Amino acid sequence: MEECGTKPELECYDVGHLYNTVYWVDQGVIKPPFWIQLILGIHGAILPSVDNLIFMKNTADKLFGDDYIFSVLAVGRHEINLGTVGVIMGGSVRVGLEDNLYLAKGELAKSNADLVAKMRRIITELGFDVAGPDEARQMLGLKGKDQTSF
């Protein structure tokens, strides 16, 4: 990964995955800033709740300090609510039809753009900034599309 300038997304479905990440950090395979996706509510993942999100975030803080950036991925009806909590906690959020089909109770989203627009409205109404693609690449230390061969 390092040789190719690839940044892994570390999908952590439970607190044990955070401890597994420590192993790879200690082996020198993963270098900061780490991008940790806290995943809640997928079959086999930690249950989707604010308490569990806080637990995962607090554990990551203890293990990685300031060496990581996190994002929240919560499925189904928890996507927007827990994503909002994640933003308030200083993280990013992932939304999209892969994880949730509904824009609101009983209202199917027509596209990923619907879910992104809703999350963006919430984030900006709460007074937070939304990163654009270039800013996100800088935050994560990514090389950018212009430096890839595909």
Image (cartoon, rainbow, N blue to C red):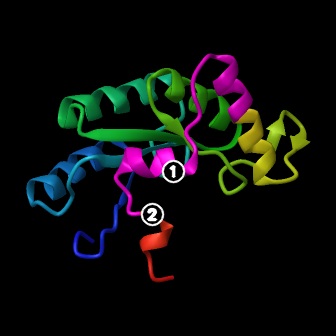
Please, is residue 32 above or below residue 90 in the view?
below
Which x, y percent locates residue 99?
65, 51
Sequence-wise first label, 1 or 2: 1
- Asked if residue 41 shows in the view, the reply is yes
Give the residue at x 40% y 24%: 54
Q: Which residue is mark 2?
A: 144
Q: Considering the image in quadrants, where does the N terminus appear?
A: bottom left
| Label 2: element kind | loop
Give the residue at x 34% y 53%: 141
Which numbered circle lies on residue 150? none
| Circles 1 and 2: CB atoms closer than 8 Å | yes
Q: Point out the residue furthest to the top here.
A: 126
Which numbered circle lies on residue 134? 1
- Asked if residue 36 shows in the view, the reply is no
Q: Point out the residue furthest to the bottom here.
A: 149
Give the residue at x 73% y 54%: 97
Which x, y percent locates residue 21?
23, 52
What amino acid does circle 2 point to? Gly
Numbered range of the magenta stretch: 120-143
Give the residue at x 22% y 75%: 3
Camera-side residue of 77 and 1: 1
Residue 79 in the magenta stretch? The answer is no
Q: CA distance from mark 1 to mark 2?
A: 8 Å
Residue 136 in the magenta stretch? The answer is yes
